[in-house]
Image (cartoon, grey):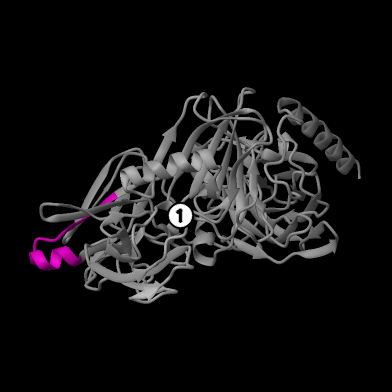
């Protein structure tokens, strides 16, 4: 009880201090609906922490997005993936707000962007930077409309707050955004790790996943554990907010050993450069194998995340024979709702003998060094500090497949993978690409560059790779109209495209020989042209689209349509 009171006092003090650093009433809500979150700041994502909050838009697109304060549009980017249509506003108070997955921009911005797209004949704009006199905005002004563009899993608004000078992202909830949340985080499972050769957990030197007992709401425990040596913990935990069923990320995780805090991690702020260390923050091998994320309550040596504080022995616990340990792990959401997991441990030495498996791999890696290895027609090159720690690397080539260690090992940098293709004819080379074949049924295209008699790619993922041939053209089909059809009432042209091999690389569409802007929804594989972009002359028109895949296979579709002009 005393510890709980002290913890509550600490949390109240912490939040008061943090909120003093950030303005509470400066920004208005970017939407005119109640704030319900589909994703929280710092949430565990694939290879990164979530850099903003995802605000639900009631399953709809096209909701007005408002400037939360005075400022100016400092940056715009339109991309097929990532944030899709994104917009950045720089504010005079030292912060920048970011909006992602938009459907379109406010009229004056939309006109500027569309004119640029037609000038470059390209949907993607790259990063466009603006001075403060180009697109100034006032608080409450409509700047854009919500959507589902880019790598979005459904309609929502991705909203960020950044420090303008450092580009560090900051939890938007510190700025007065207030979703309803009265629900405590939920623990799903506990994992215990032996962290040295002498460690034992229930008489074994291997990690162990334990089911939890729910004592009451927000309170969990496990059966008593016998252990010895240096051990660590990981927890599978998530949070839910009110009015939504999404499994969201927690705000902080703490661990106490006999009442003393050994570990603390929270997601108030972080930099994009350190986001990659998520793969050391979680149990990455477990995630790659089972798609379940366990957050460790100890810090790996190579982990450079700045989100930890007050660590004792990096959260690693030395269990001594004959002593009792009361471990408590506390998960908290931003509103301060808590859940506690209590772990009783008795120090008990084991007679079990640790037998270290003999390493039969041929390549010893010292992480700080550069390495280059060749097997048959495959070469791998690892820059200095590609690996987080020293290891023995497994690398072999069998029946055309290069097996490079295991995909469960995270990397800090990309390595280069090169295939010698001199044995192939020129025609065969044109159809080849490098693919990740960890799932042999579904080869995954890797950006393949060609130089003389070699194909090469760079990747941060270990595993199986091979040369794969793609001889099939992309598929193209018209939606909602046929060749030689009148479509006077249609506002758009829609086309579905797909590719079963290396994937779509590019497309080009014209009407009467003039380039038109077709926006690609890669999730639905649909291209859309809006007739409002251009005024057509006459009633008979020829639509043409050319689609190419990543090895150059090309398909063309042409169709004639008739359309009366509406003034």
Residue 424 drawn in magenta: yes
- Residue in the image at 28% along x and 70% along y: 557
Disc 1 marks which residue?
Answer: 532
- Magenta span covers which residues? 416-431
- When asked about the image quadrant of residue 404, the answer is bottom left
**Residue 55 percent location from the top left of the image:** 66, 50
Q: Measured from the top left, where is residue 147 in percent x and y?
A: 57, 54
The total number of labels drawn is: 1
Which residue is pictured at 76% across the width and 62% down the height?
Answer: 222
Quadrant of residue 317 in the image?
top right
Q: Is residue 311 magenta?
A: no
Image location (x, y in percent) of residue 505:
30, 59
Left or right: residue 155 compared with residue 399? right
Instruction: Say which residue appears at 22% left-offset and 66% top-offset.
Output: 553
Question: The residue tagged with tag 1: helix, strand or loop?
Answer: helix
Figure quadrant of residue 555: bottom left
Residue 177 is at least partly visible in this image? yes
Which residue occupies 42% across, 38% down?
A: 127
Above/below status of 313 relative to 343: above
Residue sitting nearer the eye, 306 or 497: 497
Q: Nearer the viewer, residue 27 or 260?
A: 27
Q: Residue 542: x, y in percent? A: 29, 66
510 left or right of 297 in image? left
Q: Quadrant of the N terminus?
A: top right
Q: Is residue 119 above or below residue 21?
A: below
Q: Is residue 481 left or right of residue 224?
A: left
72 left or right of 536 in image: right
| Front-lying residue, 450 or 463 | 450
Q: Residues within 10 Å of mark 1 (few under 14, many from 20)?
A: few
- Is any atom of residue 500 visible in this view? no
């Amino acid at each position: 009880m005393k510890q709980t009171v002290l913890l509550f006092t600490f949390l109240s003090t912490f939040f008061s201090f943090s909120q003093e650093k950030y303005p509470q009433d400066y920004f208005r809500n970017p939407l005119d609906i109640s704030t319900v979150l589909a994703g929280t700041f710092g949430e565990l994502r694939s290879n990164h922490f979530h850099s903003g909050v995802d605000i639900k838009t009631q399953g709809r697109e096209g909701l007005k997005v408002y400037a939360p304060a005075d400022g100016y549009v400092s940056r715009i980017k339109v991309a097929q993936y990532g944030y899709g249509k994104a917009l950045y506003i720089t504010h005079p108070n030292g912060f920048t707000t970011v909006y992602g997955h938009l459907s379109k921009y406010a009229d004056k911005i939309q006109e500027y962007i569309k004119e640029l797209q037609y000038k470059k004949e390209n949907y993607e704009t790259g990063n466009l930077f603006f001075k403060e006199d180009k697109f100034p905005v006032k608080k409450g002004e409509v700047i854009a409309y919500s959507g589902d563009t880019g790598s979005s899993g459904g309609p929502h608004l991705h909203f960020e707050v950044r420090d303008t000078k450092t580009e560090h992202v900051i939890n938007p909830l510190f700025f007065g955004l207030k979703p309803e949340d009265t629900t405590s985080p939920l623990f799903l499972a506990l994992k215990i790790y032996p962290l040295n050769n002498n460690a034992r957990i229930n008489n074994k030197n291997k990690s162990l996943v334990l089911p939890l007992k729910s004592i009451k709401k927000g309170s969990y425990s496990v059966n008593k554990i016998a252990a010895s040596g240096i051990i660590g913990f990981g927890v599978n935990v998530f949070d839910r907010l009110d009015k939504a069923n999404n499994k969201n990320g927690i705000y902080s995780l703490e661990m106490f050993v006999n009442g003393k805090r050994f570990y603390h991690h929270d997601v108030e702020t972080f930099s994009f450069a350190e986001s990659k260390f998520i793969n050391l923050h979680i149990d990455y091998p477990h995630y790659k194998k089972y798609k379940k994320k366990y957050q460790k309550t100890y810090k790996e040596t190579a982990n450079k995340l700045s989100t930890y504080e007050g660590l004792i022995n990096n959260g690693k616990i030395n269990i001594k024979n004959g002593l009792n340990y009361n471990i408590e792990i506390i998960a908290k959401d931003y509103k301060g709702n808590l859940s506690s997991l209590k772990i009783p441990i008795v120090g008990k030495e084991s007679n079990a003998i640790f037998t270290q498996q003999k390493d039969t791999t041929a390549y010893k890696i010292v992480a700080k060094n550069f390495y280059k290895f060749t097997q048959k027609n495959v070469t791998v090159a690892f820059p200095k500090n590609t690996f987080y720690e020293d290891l023995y690397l497994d690398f072999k080539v069998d029946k055309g497949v290069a097996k490079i260690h295991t995909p469960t090992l995270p990397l800090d940098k990309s390595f280069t993978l090169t295939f010698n293709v001199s044995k192939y004819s020129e025609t065969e080379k044109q159809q080849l690409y490098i693919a990740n074949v960890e799932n042999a049924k579904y080869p995954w295209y890797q950006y393949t560059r060609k130089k003389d008699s070699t194909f090469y790619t760079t990747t941060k993922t270990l595993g199986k790779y091979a040369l794969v041939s793609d001889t099939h053209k992309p598929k193209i089909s018209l939606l909602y109209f046929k060749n030689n059809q009148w479509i006077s009432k249609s506002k758009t042209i829609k086309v579905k495209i797909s590719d079963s091999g290396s994937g779509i690389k590019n497309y080009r569409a014209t009407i009467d020989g003039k380039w038109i802007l077709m926006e690609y929804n890669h999730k639905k594989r649909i291209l859309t042209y809006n007739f409002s972009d251009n005024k057509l002359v006459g009633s008979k028109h020829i639509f043409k689209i050319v689609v190419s895949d990543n090895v150059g296979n090309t398909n063309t579709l042409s169709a004639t349509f008739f359309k009366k002009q509406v003034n």
